[in-house]
Every structure is written in structure tokens, then in C-alpha cells.
Amino acid sequence: MRRSLATVVGLVGLAATAVVTAGGTASAAPEALVPALQRDLGLTAEQVQQRVAGEQAALSRLPGLRALAGDAFGGAWLENGSLVVSLTRADLAARVGSDGVRTRVVEHTERALTEAKAAIDARAATAPKAVTSWYVDTRANTVVVEVLEGATGADVSSFVEAAKAAGPVRVEETTTAPRTYAGAVVGGEAYYINGAGRCSIGFAVSGGFVSAGHCGSTGDSVAAADDSALGTFAGSSFPGNDYSYVRTTSSWSASPVVSGYGNGDVTVTGSAEAATGASICRSGSTTGWHCGSVGPKNQTVNYAEGSVSGLTETDVCAEPGDSGGAWVSGSQAQGVTSGGSGNCTSGGTTYFQPVSEILGAYGLSLTTG
């Protein structure tokens, strides 16, 4: 009998999901997410349901609002339950800002900010380790370059000055450096690489599952928690990107059902991208479910092993062994855990690699229910 990848999830910690139609319209948060959202966002069960439904409704309106704004679009995010759209033309505010949508007039378009960030990305190979990340801060309408507090040196100064020359850039100091969350072999739900490293499954896809690239290299063998053969890394990219595709053996079949870590199993129904400010939850084999909000997107993070571009920042915690685990907003797949700073005792920042990029890179189809 073929074993289902849902069983793999039970063994190795594939992550979250929720309850939304394939078109992205949410009616309620899945039961598996409710306790974690309540705990991490300080909400009641009723508030969780209201927030998820509101976020999905806002997401469905965003393409139309972007079209109305045209070349004046400066970005959009969720704030206190409302969708905020920034514009470089005040005369468009009345057209875009209606029916609960707020507008904000800004100086720079989203395109200008994205181009400035891309110019910094082109210098990623020269980034000193004291420069921990750079990203477009849509709310602040600028590009932020983060540098370790007190960092000095000609290499840091040179990189920062070049970044400032790229466009609207603000430099911020940080006290923490991001790291990847791959872990050593310990007991618990996980998948194991070459009998040594431990990571978490992301999402079931056609022929296997996706996870983080720093977890293993192409050709590395993968085993389930019971030491049974699970598959082989068919593709892996890190640094630069942080994603991988594990092709499973014929004993395993893909399933949209993933483990809820004691809160009941849930089902992924799609991969509609959540807006900045939306609620999001992460599942990993070390710390289980944890939730928070979506932060700046398309961020470049400078790990000790090299920089990774295209990551999304969150205020969700994670720990070693959680790498590769799934992120969901409602029932929509968002990405796989890359790395971050902090832990689930004191709190922290965690980044994920968007799942849409992984699927496109390997020509895969997300398994949905």
C-alpha cells in the first residue's frame, strides 16, 4: 500500500493550512490555526475569524485598486483591519479610497522603490556580514538597509553609500543577525538529511515536497522520522535563493492534508499571496505552530553563508529544525521557512521563501484539497 505524504507530515512536521476556496474567498480560519492565532496575536476566537475573513476580502480587491492607481501606485498593506493604498497622485485618492479603503499620498512609486532595491541586489555579492538585510518598506515609502549596531569599516561604508545612491534609502541599525534554522538530529517530527541534519517539510507538490535550500544539496538522501527512505533532493538553491524540491519514493503519495500539531489536521486550498499586515502562521518540527503578521516582502537577507533575495519578513518566531516548514495565511500556502533571529521564548523575526517562486523554479504543482 502506498503511504500518503499526509502520513509523512505526521512523522516529519509539514506545516499549516486553513479554509478558503480556490478563488481565495475566506469564510473562517481553520480550527488548527485558531489557538495559535489567539495566543500569538492576542485575539479571541471570534476576532480570529473576523480578521481572517477581512484579510481575504481585502486581498480580493487589491488587483482592481492597483489598476485604478496605475503608474501612481505606491504599495498597499493592511493596517488595523483596513486596506491602505499609497499613491503618488493626490487627485486619485477619491477614486481609489472608497468603501473602507484608505489612501495615503507618498513621494515614491512602488516601481521606483523596487528598482532601487534591485540595484542594491546587484551588489549582494559584495555585502559585508555587518549588513544584515535590505528591503522595500512599503509603509515608510523607502528602501531600508539594516546594519549591525556599531559596525564600522570601509567595506560597510562603501556598501551603504552605494545603496544610498540607488534611490530613496534609509539606513537602520539592528542588534541581531539572521541565521538559517537547520538543526542537528534530535527526536521529534522532522525529516532527516543524509542521516545528520534535520529540517521540516514545507508543502506536498507533484512528485514530492518543497522545503528550504540550505537543508540539503541536490542528490542528498532524505529519511522520515522512523528512518524509512523518503526520497532525494532533486533540486536545491542556496544562497541566492533558499528553496529545494525533494522527490519522494514510490512508497509515498502527495496529499493536501498537513499536521496541525495536536489542533487537528488542515487542508491547503491554494497559494494566493497574503498582503503585508495580514495574519500568517508557521509550522515547524521544533516549535510547532506560531503566528504573527506579514512584514516587508522581497527582502534580501545576508546570512553568514551568503545573501538570499526575495524573502518575506514576519514577526513570527522560529528555532533550529523549523527550516523548510510551511507558512499559511488562511488556507493559502505562502512559503517555506528560511531563517531569522531570536527564538520562541523571547520572540524574534523569521523570513520565508515564497512558495510561488519555488513552484515556478521547478515546474511543480501545489497539492491542494
Image (cartoon, rainbow, N blue to C red):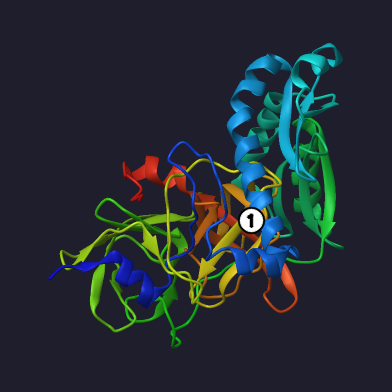
Q: Seen in the image, is 225 located left or right of residue 305?
A: left
Residue 191, located in which quarter of the rendered image?
A: bottom left
**Figure check: 327 above or below 145:** below
Residue 182 lies, in percent from the top left, at 50, 72
Q: Residue at x 49, y 77 (%)?
A: 262
Q: Can you tell which quarter of the image residue 232 is in?
A: bottom left
The amino acid type, in three-letter code, at marker 1 is: Asn
Q: How many marks?
A: 1
Q: Residue at x 57, y 57 (%)?
A: 306
Question: For mark 1, what is the residue?
Answer: 302
Q: Position of residue 12 (x, y in %)?
A: 39, 74
Q: Nearer the viewer, residue 97 or 147?
A: 97
197 sits left or right of 120 in the view: left
Q: Is residue 258 above or below residue 362?
A: below
In x, y percent, where is residue 60? 58, 32
Quarter holding the N terminus is bottom left
Question: Does any portion of residue 122 appear in the rendered image?
Answer: no
Question: For the residue labelled by badge 1, is the local secondary structure a helix, a strand or a loop?
Answer: strand
Viewer can see residue 322: yes
Say which residue appears at 74% left-offset and 45% top-offset. 159
